[in-house]
Image: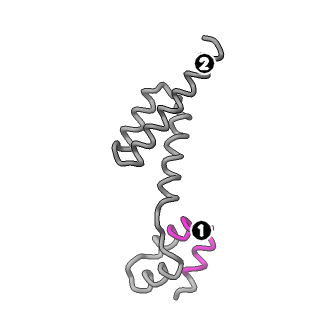
Amino acid sequence: MELAEYNLAVNQQKTNAETIISAVRLGQISEEQAQSELYNLQLTTAQVEKYLNKLEAAKRANAKLPSVSMLEGMAKKGIINAETAVETLVLLGYSESWALNIIKTWG
């Protein structure tokens, strides 16, 4: 296979993989189906993981998380426990140690 053919094949593989990831985002297929389809493209495990990680990152970026003050209110009312509060604070960008310190201030 010549370099031009190889590059064309790689670009087609990338386009197909991006199409599969878009189908998951649109709810047309499940993540499990996407993983299977990515492997059917003869991608390596590392390549499949890269696309699945991109999908997961996009889902996290689109997730609406409560603010710190909203978390405090929910914790004080017993709606969420300390573990959930810490996990959410970490998702908001705080280190786990800072998250633990923050919830200590809530009383």
Label 1: which secondary element: helix
Crowd tier of the residue under label 1, counting other residues whose Cα lies within 10 Å: few below 14, some 14–19, many 20 or above = some
Is 64 above or below relative to 9? below
Tell which tag, 2 or 1, sits nearer the viewer.
2
At horizontal 47% and vertical 76% (from top left) the residue drawn is 82
Which residues, given as a range, are shown in magenta? 87-103
Q: Which comes before the other along the chain, label 2 or label 1?
A: 2
73 lies left or right of 94: left
Disc 2/disc 1 C-alpha distance (Å): 45 Å
Q: Main secondary structure of the magenta part?
A: helix
Q: What residue sits right under mark 2 in the picture? A: 6
Name the amino acid type tagged 1. Glu
Q: What is the residue that sits farthest to the bottom in this orientation?
A: 107
Q: What residue sits right under mark 1 in the picture? A: 96
Q: Are marks 2 and 1 in contact (CB under 8 Å)?
A: no
At horizontal 38% and vertical 79% (from top left) the residue drawn is 79
Q: Does residue 63 belong to the magenta stretch? A: no
Quarter of the rendering occupied by the N terminus: top right
Name the amino acid type tagged 2. Tyr
At horizontal 59% and vertical 16% (from top left) the residue drawn is 5
